[in-house]
Image (tube, rainbow, N blue to C red):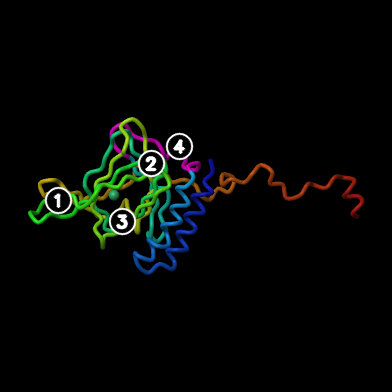
Amino acid sequence: MSLARLKKFVTTMTRIADMASDDDTWLRAARPVLGELVAVDDWLPDAYAAPDKQYYRQYLLHCDPLERFSVVSFVWGPGQLTPIHDHTVWGLIGMLRGEEISTPYRAGMDGGIDISGEPTRLVPGQVEALSPREGDIHQVKNAFDDRVSISIHVYGGNIGAVRRHVFQADGTIKQFISGYSNGAVPNLWNQSLLGLSSDSTIRKRESASERVRHR
Ligand SMILES: [Fe+2]
């Protein structure tokens, strides 16, 4: 298992952050990059793929130092689901393992909350976008009752610190800050863990006889 894929992803996202001036630019540029990350499921460390018996987990994998974006592994235990919630920042969801179902909602005329479209089922390698401008209220659940599903999310901010909302069927809206499930992030800067092969010899040491000959 190598963190090199995640390191490369974070590097590319940082370059996009340096040039993206609005949500559309972000989503257009970052979508294929996330697609590349979730196309192969061999890099997510087990510590960030561990489900909880009771609640879904949100493990922070990286947060941009300027909080322009964050990367999260979202781990669903069997049958787990979110409340109906919004994000208030753009988001991209890439399915890594298993499948999940997202149902879109919007505020109803009567003050309640209504389903606003067909549910979307994400399969491994697929990427979906969320934008507050187009409506970013949804409820998400693991598509399976008998296995873990994992998606990789990227958001336009430090999502664990963003003030957002949960919506209840009776119209009650509550503010929340999600935080993260983990206290430590993967170490992307330890080059010895980033996938160098064992055959990384630059040059062999000269033998004693060669050293004599070169003098
Ligand atoms: Fe969400």
Residue 60 percent location from the top left of the image? 39, 47
Name the residue that disc number 3 marks. 130
Find residue 46 and name its label.
4
Residue 107, above or below 144 = below
Is the Cβ of the residue at disc 4 closer than 8 Å to that at disc 1? no
The CA distance from mark 3 to mark 1 is 18 Å
Tell me the amino acid under the disc marked 4. Answer: Asp
Q: Secondary structure under badge 3?
A: strand
Q: Please provide the residue range marked out in magenta.
A: 41-56
Residue 88 percent location from the top left of the image? 26, 58
- Check if residue 45 falls in the magenta segment: yes
Residue 37 percent location from the top left of the image? 47, 50
* Mark 3 CB within 8 Å of ligand 1: yes
The CA distance from mark 1 to mark 2 is 27 Å
Q: Which residue is drawn at 27% across and 44% down?
A: 140
Tell me the amino acid under the disc marked 3. Answer: Leu
